[in-house]
Every structure is written in C-alpha cells, then in structure tokens.
Amino acid sequence: MPDNSNFIDEKNIPDNWAPKDVPAIIPGRAPLGAPAPPVPHDMPQFFSGSIAPVLQHDGSFVATEMGSPRIPKTALMPLGNQANPSTNAAAQSTAKTVAQQVVKAQPPSSSGVTSVGLTMPSIFVAPVSGSPITSAGVLAPALGPESFNTFFAGPTSAQGSVTLDTAAQNSGTGTLFSVSTPSTTANDFAILAIPDTASFAFTVTGPDASWNVINPVPTGGIGCGIFWKNVVASGTVTGNGSFSSSQTWAACLATIQVTGGGTPAVRQSKVGGSGTTSVALTSNTLAGSAIFVIVGGSWAEGTAAFLLPVTISDTQGNSYAQLVDCFKANGNTGIQAYVFAAPSSTAGALTVSVNLPIAPGSSPPAPVNFSNSTITILEVTNLGTPSFIPSFRKPDVSDIPSLPASQITSGQLLLARGGTSADLSGTGGTNQVLRQSTAGAAITVSQLANNNLLGYAATSQKSESAADTNVLTFTPPATAGSYRLRFVMSVSAATAATLGWTATWRDSNGNVQTPVNLALFQTGVAPSALTFTTSAAGNYYGQLDIDINNAATNIVIQLTFAGTSFAAKVSATIERII
C-alpha cells in the first residue's frame, strides 16, 4: 500500500532512530514481556466484523482478538464452501443449511391439501377402492361387470352413438321374470324389452308403476313388451313381474347416460303389426332426437333355435348400434328381443326396416318366420349430443374387416352359415358336382348317378322266387310328367313257372291304371307275350312309357307268378323323361 500515509520509506527514517534487539517473533505466540496493547490506532479496521457461526467454516475463529491495533481486532475465516449438493455430495450448501433451519423454525400451514380422491368413467366400479386418501393409502380402480359377448370399442360410424351406461339380460322358465343392471349413473334413461312367451291364455303383473308403458307384455303369442323411465338416483335398475302360469321368458334392459341439460322424454312411438318388417313413425322426427328400435317376439327358426344376427336400416341413413339383446330357446322357437339406437336423427319422415337372418336348416334358404314378432320405434328427446367415447357394446357388421379370400387360410365354414363343412382343395374334375349324401351332411364332390336325379328310382338284381307286388316303388313330385318304366328278369331255374310283370300308376286324366300284365319279351324269342311259361333258365325284359298327373301317386312295378317254382334276379328302373 505505497500510497498509505501511515507507512514511511526506509530513506525517511529519522537519524535519531536506532535498532533495538528484541526476542524473535514466533508465529502464533505473543512476544515475551510484550507491553499491553496500545490504544487502538486510527488505522481502518479491515475485515473486522461479526458473522453468525453457521455461515463460517469454523466457528472457533469468531471474536478471536489479535494483539496489534494494525490488524483486525476480530479474525474471520472465509465463508463456508459454496457448492451444488446434487453434483458434489461432499460439499455442504450454505443455502441448503439455511433453508433447513428456516423450515424447522416454521410449523406446517393448516391450509394445504388434506385428502385426494379419484373418480373413473362408468365402466369402472364406483366408488374407487381406497378413495379418498387422507394420509397414506392405495387407490385401486376396478373394471365393472359387463354383458356377455360385448367388447370395448368406439362408435360404429361417424355419427357417434348414445352413451350406453349399463346393459343386462336374463331368461328362464317359471312364473316370475326379472332383469337387473349393475350400478348405474344418476339421471340415466332406461329402456326395458320383454318379448312374448310363445304361449296363450295367461296374465302378466309388472313391471312396477315407475315404468312408462309403450306396449304391454304380450299374452297372445305376438310381439314384445316395451317400457321406459328416467332413473333419478344411481344404483341398480330392475324390471320384474310375474305370470299367472309358468312361462318360458326372456328380458333385456339398457340404461343410457344423459349428456344434455334436459330431461329425456319419448316424443312419439310406433308399434308395427305382427310380421311387418318395415314401420314408419306417424310424425316427422326432430333434428337431434335419438331413435330407439326394438325388435322382439318369438321366431320359428327351422331345425333349431339360435340367437340370430339382426340389423336395422332407415330412410334417413342413420347408423344403429345394438345396445342389448335377450334370448331363450323353446324347442325350435326362439324367444328374443333386440334393442338398437341411433344417436341423432335429422328433421323429417322416418321409416325403419329390419333385415332378417336366414333360418338355420331351411331348404331352400329362407328368412326366419317373423309372423309372431314386431318392430317398435321410439323418438327420444333431450338425451344430449352423440358420444364418441369407447364403450362396451355388441359387435356390429362394420366391426368385421373386409379380408381378401387369399388371407383366409384355415378353418371351415359351417353348413348353417353357408359353407361346405369340408376342405375341397383336393377335389374336382370333369363332370364333378357338389352334393350332399344325406340331410345336414358335409358337402362332397362326385359325379352324379341316375339315382341322384329327382325323377329317378331303381333296384338292381333283386332275388325273387315268388310273386312280388313291390319290386320297385317311386313317389313322383307333385307335377305332371312323363316317365319310362323298365323291367329286366334273369331266370336261373324254373319248373312250370308262368312269369310276367305289371305296374300301377295314376294317368294324366287322374285315372288309376292297374293292368294285370304288361308286354314281356324273352331274349332271342319273338313275339312278345303278357306271360311266359317256362321250366328252363332264360332272360326277359319289358318297357313302358306313361304320363301322370300332379297327384304324386306312387308308381309301382310288380312281378307276377303262377305255377310250381322259379329262381330269378330282377332289376327295375323308373325315370322321368319330361
């Protein structure tokens, strides 16, 4: 510090100053016999001051006074090491230390979060297990029960869908009927369908008065009972009642969440006549109304009863998703109902049509007998906007992708679904046809024989030793036609045997023909005769062309015999010519 006026240079030392011997100065020790410290010098006390011990590397240096006025009276160590503890765990952060002390010094505030709860969409069980958490705990959402044969998917079209909350179905036999949903959301719109029981002369009690009646449960073997209501509170929704006598029954129920601000109401409805596959609403629909279609009744389905696929279309081009169905087999009759919905109609006229499935085992294939079933249409307002959120629903035809046949490399399509029940990749050839040997048998490939034709019957080398009134019988179809009858007999032995042949039929005028004998030829012998008497082996044949009417009367070829004895083999054919 050369500019300090308190320092002097050696050249400026006065002449009267003389050196003085003193004991050596040992660092850290005060000089022996050192005088008391002088009065503090007016030199600035650099670095003097006091800082809290927590901010110093070593608190023992605090307030340590030195014996000279020319150095600070209080010695200070540098501040503690400054470092980021996340990058140098060995270094202690002054800021961290201060923060810890501040936190310890202040009690926690009572205005913070005291609990955490969790709500989930309607496909989960409500309330969520463990919710709310007030200290420590586990939130455990769980999926709720769903109807069988449903899957989690989005809407079937760009139109969206109604927001299905719950669906349920049930069936049985007895005097009581009941169907209940899982827990529903408050303010749901509920719809209940109970198809006819394919029975007569009974009465029905229920469902209860909370349900609005569109069509009562049928007691005359035709149609479907339809009911609806607004569900005020969350919980299980039930439709139940009783029959005056034991019935085979089915019932289904669906609840739909209301996404708008109003209360749902059925603006109009229409129940179609029995067997009618298209039904029109009486008035034009409002824009934005939801349309519900219920198809229900008892169907005679041919050889067996199954829950068969049904689809809906209408004149507005709305897309219908199936919400729920129910089914109960009663012999070859299916008691069933289907509930469909389209989320938003346009303003205008509306006609709905049902597309019926093919009855299993029908030949030729034909739709199920719909004569005991009906279509019911409901226009419902205030359900809210269409939903595009995935939900559990029934599969739709649009869910099945279009696959090229080249990608279908395994499995067999059953007869009931239009297949062959067979692998035909190694069959075929000239004059080969697809055929079934018996009713319900798998399809095979072979050439046709005469006996495979509709107007043909035959017997071959039938052993005979007496008169035979039924060598061959054929029942023709109930259409007029021309037929050729052929008779062949090979006699191996005979003793005074008089042999011949004849036939019976109904001619084109409706007259029954029963001639005693018909012309018979012996090979190598002319002319023909009505009978031949022989005691030797020989071959005989005869042929006759006839016309028949449409009465489907049997055509019968017979062998005649009189005499002692004979043994022969007889063949006969009856074939349609025209």
Image (cartoon, rainbow, N blue to C red):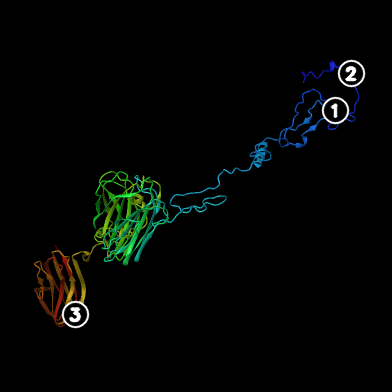
Disc 2 secondary structure class: loop
Residue nearest the observer in this picture, 401 or 532: 401
Q: Tag on residue 37? A: 1
Which disc, if any, is residue 443? Answer: none
Cα distance in 3D space between marks 2 and 1:
22 Å
Residue occupied by mark 2: 17
Which quadrant holds the C terminus?
A: bottom left
The reply to whether callout 2 and callout 3 are in contact (CB within 8 Å) is no
Amino acid at circle 2: Trp
Give, as a three-letter code, the residue at label 1: Pro
Q: Earlier in the sequence, mark 3 or mark 1?
A: 1
Tag nearer the camera, 3 or 1: 1
For numbered disc 3, what is the local secondary structure? Answer: loop
Q: Earlier in the sequence, mark 2 or mark 3?
A: 2
Marks 3 & 1, CB-CB < 8 Å contact? no
Q: Which mark is residue 465?
A: 3
Distance (Cα) linking label 2 and label 3: 177 Å
Q: Residue furthest bottom?
A: 564
Q: Position of residue 259 (x, y in %)?
A: 38, 46
Give the residue type at disc 3.
Ser
Decide: few, some or many residues near mark 1? Use Cα within 10 Å; few <14, some 14-19, many ≥20.
Answer: few
Task: Indicate the quadrant where residue 174 lies.
Answer: bottom left
Viewer-proximal residue, 315 or 55? 55
What is the x, y in percent for residue 501? 13, 75
Which numbered disc, 2 or 3, marks the residue closer to the eye?
Answer: 2
Q: CA distance from mark 3 to mark 1?
A: 164 Å
For marks 2 and 1, give the one nearer the viewer: 1
How many discs mark residues in the rendered view? 3
Q: Is residue 503 visible?
A: yes
